[in-house]
Amino acid sequence: MSDQITHAIQSTNLADILERVLDKGIVIAGDIQIRIADIELLTIKIRLMVASVDKALEMGIDWWQHDSYLSSDGKTAELEEENKELKKRLERLEEKIK
């Protein structure tokens, strides 16, 4: 009987890797510190998360939906809040006039 060695070769391409990363998500964290003679001059904290929109929503991350620069919904909410504040100010001014 001859013994045969079997190798499982699994090839993945960039699209497969990207699909897995977006599906599962990946977090990259790092800190950069600049010091001179044990005196900290600058600290930069870097936090990067890469995930699909669906995965981010599943994790409760949805900041882009409320950002006025990225979403019309965010602009609407911002305008509604500004409108409420202006109405309150107008009411206060009208009461002072009376």
Image: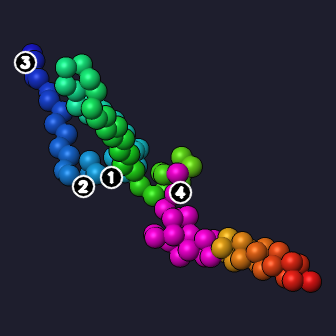
Q: Residue at x 57, y 49 (%)?
A: 60
Residue for badge 3 = 2
Tell me where residue 18 appears, x and y as whole percent.
28, 51
Spot the residue most to the right: 98
Question: Considering only vertical position in the picture, is 28 above or below 3?
Answer: below
Task: First in sequence, mark 4 or 3: give its number.
Answer: 3
Q: Going from the N terminus, do you reach mark 1 or mark 3 first? A: 3
Q: CA distance from mark 3 to mark 2?
A: 39 Å
**What kind of element bears circle 2?**
helix
The residues bearing labels 1 and 4 have C-alpha atoms spaced at a distance of 20 Å
Q: Quadrant of residue 87?
A: bottom right
Examine the structure image and report whether residue 87 is included in the region drawn in magenta: no
From the viewer's perspective, is residue 44 above or below residue 75? above
Query: Mark 3 against mark 2, which lies toward the viewer?
Result: 2
As shown in the figure, which amino acid type bears the numbered disc 4? Asp
| Amino acid type shown at disc 1 | Glu
Q: Which residue is tagged 1?
A: 19
Snapshot colouring: rainbow
Q: Give the alpha-carbon distance from disc 4 to disc 2, as whole Å.
A: 25 Å
Label drawn at residue 62: 4
The residue labelled by disc 2 is 15
Q: Which residues are magenta?
A: 61-79
Residue displayed at 10% across by 18% down: 3
Quarter of the N terminus within the rendering: top left
